[in-house]
Amino acid sequence: MTAAIIGAGIAGIAASIRLAVRGYSVDVFEANAYPGGKLSSFEQNGYRFDAGPSLFTMPHLVDELFRLAGRNPQDYFEYNRLDETCRYFWDDGTQLTAWADHEAFGREVEAKLGEPAGHLHAHLKDSAQKFDVTEKLFLHRSLHKASTWLNRDALRGYWHLPRLGVFGTMNGANERRFRNPKLVQLFNRYATYNGSDPYQTPALMNIIPHLEYNIGAFFPKEGMIGITNSLVKLAEDLGVRFHYNTRVTEVVTEGNKVVALRLKQGGKTASLPTAHAPGPLQFNVVISNMDVVNTFRKLLPTARQPERILKQPKSSSGLIFYWGIRQTFPQLGLHNIFFSNDYKTEFDYLFHRHELYQDPTIYLNITSKHKPDDAPPGCENWFILLNAPNNTGQDWDAIITEARQNVIRKLSHNLGVDLAPLIETEAILDPRSIEFKTSSSQGALYGNSSNNRFAAFLRHANFSREFDNLYFVGGSVHPGGGIPLCLLSAKIATEMIG
Ligand code: FAD
């Protein structure tokens, strides 16, 4: 049996491994010259930067792929659990470290914010309980098959429905839980982990802190790119063929089957027939890891378009500054957040005005803290991410110029330095370039936003209703964006394939 995968994003790579383990002959077609899509990396002037994701959670989902293939995960991929998950900074001088150890974190919130540790412990316990119910129901199964709704886990889920927080907002639940607005802000931040707005997204999204605080935050020894590289190595060891610089331009269909892929390879156009047509390369199954909106609009323009799903509002995007900094900052850790003074207004700008707020929350990731060779001696590699609206044709050049000044001003204030002269190299990624480099509709980081309680049901299924041998994986389809959910999309899709 043969399979073609469109795109070597993390979900496409995972799907290739799962099918190869089952004996499929697998070809992956990737438009870029490199694998990983958003999960890639680059070097510039002696600095190495992970281009996209920086937080690694649920590493067991990566390990699972090595084990499925009968390999020892540590032969391919090593990572460590972090003692501190993030350092938080506010402009009034408040600083707080979120420790992985719950007791230490509890002491920290009591000492720094005057918040009883019990509130924190209750929140993390509630997060674990919500996760336990929803994981089995939503994350490992297709939502689009009757069997998902009729099994024991589902019945248990209905019983717990009122407690899951489907009806209120994340911010509402956090305001009821915590006294100190800074802690509300800290836990509201988790809405951004799937590109949503804490003032709109359901309280159910309070499951997200469970990943970081209860399961843990991790750092791959080789940086985030280690995830991509080790899985590509595994796939290749299993016989998967990766074709880079090869863009799929059309999925050719006949009746209810995909019959061929049309490709553009190094400027030349080629057509690779599937099992249903004669020719050198034959595919029984096609999996698209391309964003589902663009799969339909660009590769299947004459097929029935699931408009309601494709037109759902997209998640936020990001504006990223990659800076080589010629100084080290002992007060900073691997993950750092510098909060906006007005979080509500910041999200109003992002999701209603589709603009960047002038006092943005700044996420600063420095992998050279754990992997010193990522920067020259005495220097640090700064990855600065601002939540940004998705691309609706804004004047991004003007936005970037203003945001850069705002970031330098805020960080200079918080760190007590003049930051601008310390930047010795720079690269920038914005919603336009995210869209261009990975085909993500509107440059969204996580597909659709989860700003309403029906969002989970308005992501596309992992299979096509029209074509029997077409499947979908990745951050734009069920169960959602982020590395762990993309890995699960590959599991759900490939388990449906006979
Ligand atoms: P993508 O990464 O979207 O890749 C799709 C691939 O398909 C691309 O390589 C593209 O070139 C290829 N492709 C598309 N169309 C075609 C075609 N027609 N022919 C051939 N190839 C094609 N997640 C986390 O878990 N933790 C984080 O900390 C985190 N931070 C993030 C920060 C940033 C700046 C970004 C951009 C994302 C972040 N994410 C994070 C989200 C995470 O990166 C994504 O959810 C995930 O990597 C998406 O993987 P995917 O499988 O959907 O494929």
Image: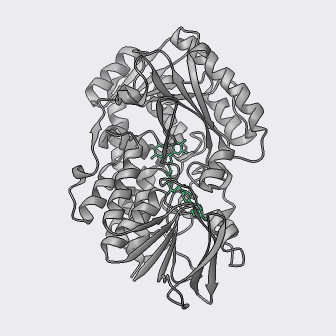
Foreground residue, 355 or 209?
A: 355
Colouring used for the render: one colour
Foreground residue, 63 or 174?
A: 63
Please tell me whether residue 409 is drawn above or below residue 352 in the rendered image.
Answer: above
Asked whether the viewer can see residue 390, the reply is no
The image shows residue 155 at horizontal and vertical percentages of 37, 67
Determine which quarter of the picture holds residue 371. Answer: top left
Q: Is residue 472 left or right of residue 346?
A: left
Asked whether the viewer can see residue 423, the reply is yes
Please tell me whether residue 493 is drawn above or below residue 260 in the rendered image.
Answer: above
Determine which quarter of the picture holds residue 153. Answer: bottom left
Give the total of numbered labels. 0
Q: Is residue 488 left or right of residue 76?
A: right
- Residue at x 67% of width, y 30% of height: 345
**Dividing the image into 4 quarters, which one contains the N terminus?**
bottom left
The image shows residue 370 at horizontal and vertical percentages of 34, 29
- Residue at x 50% of width, y 11% of height: 93
Q: Is residue 73 left or right of residue 312?
A: left
The image shows residue 402 at horizontal and vertical percentages of 73, 25
- Residue at x 45% of width, y 71% of height: 27
**Dividing the image into 4 quarters, which one contains the C terminus?**
bottom left
Q: Is residue 124 left or right of residue 286?
A: left
Foreground residue, 496 or 313?
A: 496
- Residue at x 68% of width, y 66% of height: 308
The image shows residue 407 at horizontal and vertical percentages of 62, 22
